[in-house]
Amino acid sequence: MIALKDRIGAGIYIYPMPLVVVGSMTEDRPNYTTVAFCGVVEVQPPMIQITLAKTRFSCKNIREFESFSINVPSMDMLRGVDFMGIYSGKTTDKSELFKTFYGELKNAPMIEEAPLNMECKLVDVFDFGGTHETFIGEVVQSYCSEFCIVNGLPDIKKINPATFSVYDNSYWSLGIHLGKAWNIGMKYTPPKTIHD
């Protein structure tokens, strides 16, 4: 029997979405903005996409300096991170909310307090004719707080990231560990299907 479903319209119902802070340079200072439209494009070379409203101040900055950073904040940074998403860099200097550092690119500002940072050089920009544009960046270097590294890799529990739910504009913490990917299904037996 098929479960009843309601039509809810075309939408981006991806739950949850990552909560990150994008860093970019202006002519005289770093600027940061909170973003949830962020994802992996390619593993090798490592590439990430961010999607921003065309009205965002960061769009101009990224195009001009051809770089940006992805900063993964921890839960204890949430109030400051939310502030960064409320106010525009056009009218508000957000560079003093957290400490800034620079890596190999020298023009992709990163947040020192964020447990995980990736500096990206701009590869391409896509405009699909809507209200947003998508920036593709190649990760040239990643930085992780020492206390968040386990066996040479960032540990999700130690980073303690927040996630975002888009249509109700809510932040969520991560839940419990469920098992190892490409492992918990090894002993799964699919139900038998009945063919007419």
Image: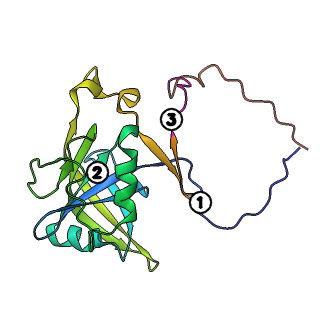
Label 1 crowd (10 A; few <14 / some 14-19 / many >=20): few
Amino acid type assigned to the residue bearing label 3 in the image: Leu
Q: CA distance from mark 2 to mark 3?
A: 19 Å
Outermost residue toward the right? 196
What range of the chain is rendered magenta?
Answer: 173-180
Mark 2, residue position = 70
Mark 2 or mark 1: whose residue is earlier in sequence: 2
Mark 1, residue position = 167
User: In the rendering, which numbered label is found on residue 191?
Assistant: none
Residue found 43% across the figure and 58% down from its top: 37
Looking at the image, how many numbered discs can be counted on the residues?
Answer: 3
In this rendering, would 124 be left or right of 185? left
Residue found 38% across the figure and 61% down from its top: 85
Mark 3, residue position = 174
Taking 168 as reference, is 125 above or below it? Answer: below
Q: Position of residue 57 (x, y in %)?
A: 28, 72
Report which quarter residue 29 is drawn in. bottom left
User: Along the line of sight, which residue is nearer the eye, 193 or 153?
Assistant: 153
Q: Secondary structure at mark 2?
A: strand
Mark 3 or mark 1: whose residue is earlier in sequence: 1
Label 2 crowd (10 A; few <14 / some 14-19 / many >=20): many
In this rendering, would 105 be left or right of 115? left
Amino acid type assigned to the residue bearing label 2 in the image: Ile
In this rendering, would 191 be left or right of 76? right
